[in-house]
Image (tube, coloured by chain):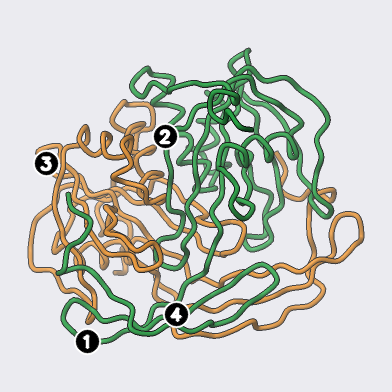
Chain colours: A green, B orange
Amino acid sequence: MTNDDPHLKEVATASELLFQGNFLTARRDTVRLPDGHSATREYVIHPGAVVVVPLLDDGRVVLERQFRYPVERVMVEFPAGKLDAGEDPLICGQRELLEETGYRAREWAHAGAMHLAVAYSTEIIHVYFARGLTAGERQLDHGEFLDVFAAPVDQLLGWCRDGTVTDAKSLTCMLWLTQYLSGAWPLDWMTPHQANPAG
Amino acid sequence: MTNDDPHLKEVATASELLFQGNFLTARRDTVRLPDGHSATREYVIHPGAVVVVPLLDDGRVVLERQFRYPVERVMVEFPAGKLDAGEDPLICGQRELLEETGYRAREWAHAGAMHLAVAYSTEIIHVYFARGLTAGERQLDHGEFLDVFAAPVDQLLGWCRDGTVTDAKSLTCMLWLTQYLSGAWPLDWMTPHQANPAG
């Protein structure tokens, strides 16, 4: 499959800042459609993020419970966070896992990436697995409140099925986790040193 | 698990319209954090959506290729669309499948729901499966350009693994599809008439 189909592609002809908030930035672009007509596209600019699937030695995974204001509920999620400017995704994953859960991991594996909301956001989330975990003190950001807990994969799968887990990035991680555990999608594990010799 | 943890919950104390675009609407709310401090939350208001996993009798699934401007690429996705005001999700799924692909389905099953971008959007996507498909003429909206095609599930899974498919809602659907096909998550199939006697 090619990614450059003229019969599908939209080309920008103008771009304006829609608003710049404390957290959200949005733009409105004018585009030329494949048939030559014009349309506008409004979307959120996002720096990208990382989500981590932390595997404990006993077979459980590390999860978080966090109140998510836009959906007005406590969500069960894998640890995740936004990339700092210029930050390597693996470094971000290590930082977020440590800050939010207190865990450090001996080995890491890059599984893939997802685009979260393709209709209105630039956000890409890089998916990492972590194993060889050791617990420590977490370092939550000011104003960040979340619970950390561990659950067996089978129980987590049940929560995905029964609607306890509805977070799309975490459900997507469960596709990778189930395929990894079945042996269908092996991962290429590495130590942080191998991954970032300069780090 | 309870969904009303005082040590996690944020309570709105003020709300303002951040902007109202042609497509996006965003608000900025002031909230009281669990520790009594204040913070702001900026988020997109979304009407909700439906995604459909259409199963052909030969074992393939129906997919779309669509240019997604915010991520600047042609994405492989399951058919999906936004809820009209007050629209039943099943009716929306039937409408979007017909409009975008031309297919009608004899049987439908509700699989679950996902919250797409919990940090900055209210969007919930309802997941439906459809089978007993018959092809017809599609009825694309003005300015909508997309290709419809079918692929075997194994090939689609390969695309999820190798990064050809990166759309989070479609990857989440693949969790349900793999669990359904393995027999682990059976679905409760119904005809549209059973589901909507008045429809």
Residue hosting label 4? B23
Q: Nearer the viewer, mark 4 or mark 3?
A: 4
> Could you tell me how far apart the alpha carbons at marks 4 and 3 are, in whole angstroms?
37 Å
> Could you tell me how far apart the alpha carbons at marks 2 and 1 are, in whole angstroms?
39 Å
User: Dot 1 falls on which chain?
Assistant: A
Of A174 and A10, the residue lying toward us: A10
Question: In the picture shown, does residue B116 fall above or below A101?
Answer: below
Amino acid at pointer 3: Asp
Residue hosting label 1? A37
> Could you tell me how far apart the alpha carbons at marks 2 and 3 are, in whole angstroms?
24 Å
Of A28 and A146, the residue lying toward us: A28
Q: Which residue is drawn at the image coordinates 22% and 86% (left, top)? A: A37
Establish whether labels 2 and 1 are both on one chain.
Answer: yes
Residue hosting label 2? A175
> How would you rate the neighbour count of disc 1 (Cα within 10 Å): few for under 14, some for 14-19, many for 20 or more?
few
Q: Nearer the viewer, mark 1 or mark 3?
A: 1
Q: Give the quadrant of the C terminus of chain A.
A: top right
Residue hosting label 3? B57
Amino acid at pointer 1: His
What x and y, as percent, mark residue A60? 61, 20
Where disc 1 sits, the SS reads: loop
Q: Which mark is residue B56?
A: none
Q: Are marks 1 and 3 in contact (CB under 8 Å)?
A: no
User: Dot 4 falls on which chain?
Assistant: B
